[in-house]
Amino acid sequence: DLGAGTATLTFFHLLGGAAGLSVLGTVFAALTAGSTGAAAATAVVFAIMALVAAVALVAVLLIAEQPLPVAEPVPVSSTTTPRRAGTRTPTPPRRAGSS
């Protein structure tokens, strides 16, 4: 579930970035095509992004925090010994004549 949530978050993050870039690029192109210079168009685009960032900050602050669910630990038997990561379980030797 955590992997699916992370993938979904990354997808929408990239989708929002592409949409935001296209909208702001359109605003910038429209302002520079008119009588406004590039410096004034850049200032307008930055002002729009400052407003969007402020709205996003307020939205994030209003989200209620929910703790992650904690799974119960799996008990370890006293007869087993822990293995190091990356080690293989030894296989028993084969008997002669068996296939």
Image: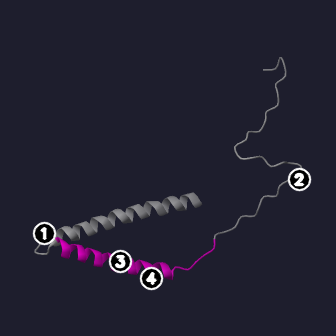
Q: Is residue 3 above or below residue 31?
A: above
Amino acid of disc 3: Val
Residue depicted at 49% across the width and 81% down the height: 61
| Residue identifier under label 3 | 52
Pointer 4 or 2: first along the chain: 4
Residue 81 image position (x, y, % from top left)? 84, 48
Pointer 3 or 4: first along the chain: 3
Residue 49 image position (x, y, % from top left)? 32, 75
Q: Which mark is residue 72?
A: none
Residue 95 vs residue 3: left or right? right
Using the rendered view, name the quadrant where residue 26 is placed: bottom left
Residue stretch in magenta: 38-67
Residue 21 image position (x, y, % from top left)? 30, 65
Residue 77 vs residue 86: left or right? right
Cα distance, mark 4 to mark 2? 52 Å
| Residue identifier under label 2 | 78
Amino acid of disc 1: Ala
| Residue identifier under label 4 | 58
| Residue identifier under label 1 | 33
* Proximity of marks 3 and 4: CB atoms separated by less than 8 Å: no
Residue 66 lies in the magenta stretch: yes
Amino acid of disc 2: Ser
* Proximity of marks 2 and 3: CB atoms separated by less than 8 Å: no
Pointer 1 or 2: first along the chain: 1
